[in-house]
Image (cartoon, rainbow, N blue to C red):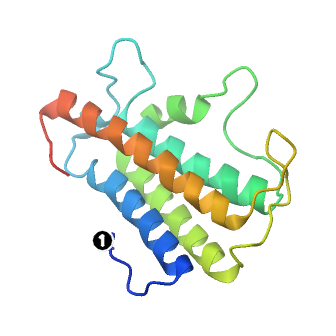
Amino acid sequence: MTRTDEPPAWDERTQLATFLDYVRATARAKCEGVSPENAVKAPLSGSPLMTLSGLVNHLRWVEYWWFQVVFLGEEDEGPWTDEDPDREMRIAVDMPPADVLAEYEEQCARYRKLVAEHDLDATAKRPVRDGRHVDLRWVILHLIEETARHNGHLDIIRELLDGETGV
């Protein structure tokens, strides 16, 4: 997939989908060429869960939560528990980094299709914390924001691990 923030068309759906794919591709690009050993290191002493693999796995499961659990209303089968709410970040260090990235890409492809098949005004089956049912547009915007924020974390971690910058 080519990383671009320029949509092929200027309708709202294409713009939103393009930006979501752009931030997804940026997350993957920030992990390119990193050694498997570095992918699971947490260089920030106060943030032991902040690894490249952990953050990408987190992004994978965040999309799962918003698209499958909230929007589609499916049962939550995520890796987290009440005792370990950040488990998706913790288990990633025991997975090959290539598998983490492949699972993320597979899930992105599935959700790319979901976005194409639903109206942006379609409302989520499950409410958010305040009881409102957000629409698909809100979910996409939220995922753009969340992924972009974590791309900043990925950028810092990558620089601390091996000096790589500029992606």
Q: Which residue is mark 1?
A: 4
Quadrant assignment, res 138: bottom right
- Of helix, strand and loop, which one carries label 1? loop
Crowd rating for badge 1 (residues with CA inside 10 Å; few <14, some 14–19, many 20+):
some
Instruction: Examine the rendered structure and indicate whether residue 117 appears above or below residue 142.
Output: below
Q: Is 27 placed left or right of 122 in the picture?
A: left
Q: Position of residue 29 (x, y in %)?
A: 27, 55
Which residue is farthest bottom? Answer: 9
Front in this rendered view, residue 34 or 55: 55
Q: Position of residue 101 (x, y in %)?
A: 41, 54
**Residue toward you, 144 or 52:** 144
Residue visible at 87% across and 44% down in the picture: 131
The residue lying at 44 percent from left, 84 percent from top is: 10
Residue appearing at x 85%, y 53% in the figure: 126
| 166 relative to 46, above or below | below
Amino acid type at circle 1 is Thr
Q: Can the viewer see residue 75?
A: yes
Q: Is residue 117 left or right of residue 19?
A: right
Q: Quadrant of residue 83?
A: top right
How many numbered discs sit on the rendered protein?
1
Q: On the rendered structure, is 162 left or right of 38?
A: left
Query: Which residue reaches farthest left?
Result: 163
Q: Position of residue 123 (x, y in %)?
A: 80, 65
Q: Position of residue 70 (x, y in %)?
A: 77, 54
Q: Quadrant of residue 112?
A: bottom right
Quarter of the image that includes the N terminus: bottom left
* Residue 96 seen: no
